[in-house]
Amino acid sequence: MKQEENSRSAQGALAEQDSFLSLRDLWAMCWARKFWFVLSLGLFLGGAILYILITPPVYKRTATLLIKDDSKGKGLSLNDQFSFGDMGLLQSNTNVNNELISIQSPTLTLEVVRRLGLNVEYYADGRYYKEVLYGQELPYRVKFLGLKDTDNASLTLTILANGQFAISNLMLNDNELQTQRITCSLGDTISAPIGKLVIVRSESYLADKSKTRPSQIYVSYQNLYNVQELYSSGLKASINNDKASIIDIAYQDRSIQRAEDFLNMLINVYNESWVKDKNQVAISTSLFINERLSVIEQELGHVDKDISSFKSANLIPDLKETTRIYLDQTSEAEAQLLDLSNQLYMARYIRQHLGTDTNATQLIPAISGIGNKLIDQQIGEYNQKMLERNSLRANSSDENPIVQDLTTQIGAMRSIILSSLDNQILTLDNQARSLKTRSGQATARISANPTQAEYLISVERQQKIKEALYLFLLQKREENELSQAFSAYNTRVITPPIGKMMPISPLRRNILLAALVLGLLLPVALIYLSESMNTALRSCRDLEGMTIPIAGELPALEPTISGLRGWLGRLFKKKKSMKKDIRFVVQENNRNMINEAFRLVRTNVEFMLTNKEGARVIATTSINIDSGKTFITLNLAASFAAKGHRVLMIDADMRVASLSAFGPVEGDGLSALLAGRATNYHGLISSSLLDNLYILPVGTLPPNPTELLAGQNFAELLESLRQEYDYIFIDCPPVAIVADATLISRHIDMTVFVARVGLLDKSSLPVLESYYRESRYPNMVLVVNGTELDNRYGYNRGYGASHGYYAKK
């Protein structure tokens, strides 16, 4: 359980280290590939410079317009503006958004293109591209007299030395016209296959002594509507500020003068169009007002005549004054009648109160409004007597003579009051009937002739309406005439078309900066991507998280060549199998890098085997094939032999037998000894190319190498050989392929695992770590094979810069 935890922790540490790539590591990898940056910068900067040279410059011109408010300065009231605005006779206040759309309308752009003749373009040969000829740079123009607006044509105008012109390369609607060269003079009318042509001198041309006049001019006549779409797409207009009626107009062109002319002409055409539209409205308004005035004048005369005739025929005075008098009388009678009705109501109420027997001892309500002071006085006296009687009766009884006397007086007074009330009610009734009669007479007088009154009111109403409308139209006619006489442009140019003399495209600084950045970033991205996707062992840096001892690292057989030659060689070289490169590289008294590296490995191996007694048996194996184990076995054994030790090499890879190539080609070998076909190993061991170095080849390749190695003969053979040799090196098959190395590990003192850079996948490192932690192979050490001089991580562990320095010495 503890071993599994250790294995998992080691795998996690290696995975974390594998995913880590520091800035220092990235810098080292980039520095090792300096030529990539040189090549990338050269390509990008070269492409940027080429793009700048072949791309024509584009210039930008802008203008600023103030849209005037056409309501300012007019003396119209708010009501007049609303009324005429609804009728469509007065223009409403200018809307800057509407004017923004109007400025960008295709109709205006088409008129500008037509006036400036922008559908005819002129070019001349430049150093890197064709230059635009326009305005002051155009010496001659060509008039196309027979072409339609929808045609496309082109020709080449050559200026001859004698002052004449030659026309060639005629094309019409993408069809090349086969015709001979046409020679003509200035101002001649030429009958060409594309129609009649006239060459005229450009009025605005200014000869520049610093520039030579072009000898050839390329003329292009384009579809007028296509050109209009092109200029419309290039025109940009926007509102400068939401709180202001200011519009910014911008246009980009290869010719500065053409951009300025386009904006100036656009402003002029817009102003002309606005004034024309405004005058058309004013003229239409004037015609409408005059027509309506004539009609209303006739109708008003007829109305006046009808009123006069009607009053004369019916002897009607002023109807309004008469009606007012009778209405006043009627109102007065109705008010009096209402007062009499109130008095009648109060008199009848008191009459009813006194006539009720239950109220004989009650006071009469003191209610005014009867309209008779005598009755009011009688009621007051009656109430006073009643109070006296009720007071005495409360202190005595009904038999009291005073009470009885007061009761008699009160009864007499009630009779008198009732009689007075009856007379008052009769009087009020008579007065009410009289008022009703008077009111009816007044009302009858008002409604005596209802048809005549209704007719007069209707006719007089029509008369007033027509008089008001007549005066209103007279006023508007004068205002319309003044507006038409003093029409002004709707805009004011705040800033005429201006701009910088530097082109806005191509922006050389930005393009070169972008090329520089891309030239630097692309190699970095490729290096980072390649290294991030590379799962193979790159250097000893990838082994820092492992606990297995590292005996050393060996450089690649072919030294790294710097510069362009080395980079191209590594780029196009074909990957070779390691066994084809098996050879002796260790030489006595040789101080090159590979020899120093093997000496370092030999020293580390000797140090690790210091405590071992007797001979040392060392097995060399790997996880992958072509890791270089046979090469390392051969040369590591040679380094020990060069030190004076007796060294035996045993080729235990009885499937490939790469090491046996350095021994006898034919005859028996290890396979015969293990199979029992031979017993004397002395006759099978032969010396190699070096002193003190011997080899026991495989001999005949057996069909069952695993079974032979598992037998007792192999163990007995090694025991015998330990007595005769100082070191025994066994070349074993890869452990991940067959079980031979595992069987051999039971009889050895040290296991050297070979990890080849660029071949061993880093996912196999945890496997090696588990072998070491589980002690599956005795005394495991690791040798890194095939490292480069320009180590990718910038580390040269074991041989690096110092070994390179000493090797050069």
Image: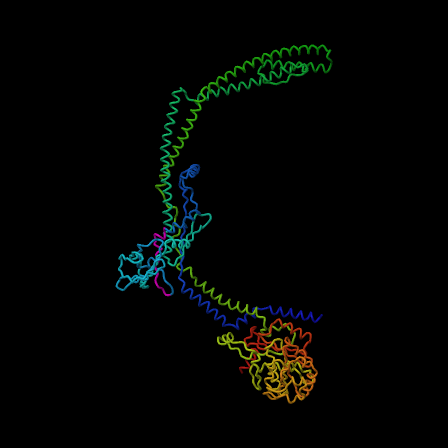
Q: Is residue 195 magenta?
A: no
Q: Is residue 252 visible?
A: yes
Residue found 66% across the figure and 71% down from its top: 10
Q: Is residue 554 above or below residue 533?
A: below
Tag count: 0
**In the rendered image, which quarter is residue 604 located in?**
bottom right
Query: Is residue 122 rendered to the left or right of residue 667?
Result: left
Query: Is residue 345 rendered to the left or right of residue 778?
Result: left
Q: Is residue 17 above or below residue 678?
A: above
Q: Is residue 706 above or below residue 5?
A: below
Task: List x then y, in percent, for residue 646.
Answer: 64, 87
Query: Is residue 633 rendered to the left or right of residue 105?
Result: right
Q: Is residue 125 magenta?
A: yes
From the viewer's side, name the closer residue of 261 and 729. 729
Q: Is residue 200 visible?
A: no
Query: Is residue 21 rendered to the left or right of residue 500?
Result: right
**Magenta span covers which residues?**
111-127
Task: List x then y, in percent, for residue 208.
Answer: 32, 61
Residue found 69% across the figure and 69% down from its top: 5
Task: List x then y, in percent, for residue 186.
Answer: 27, 59
The C terminus is located in which quarter? bottom right
The N terminus is located in which quarter? bottom right
Tell me how the rendering is colored. Answer: rainbow
Task: List x then y, in percent, for residue 50.
Answer: 42, 66
Residue found 42% across the figure and 59% down from its top: 504
From the viewer's side, name the closer residue of 608 and 655. 655
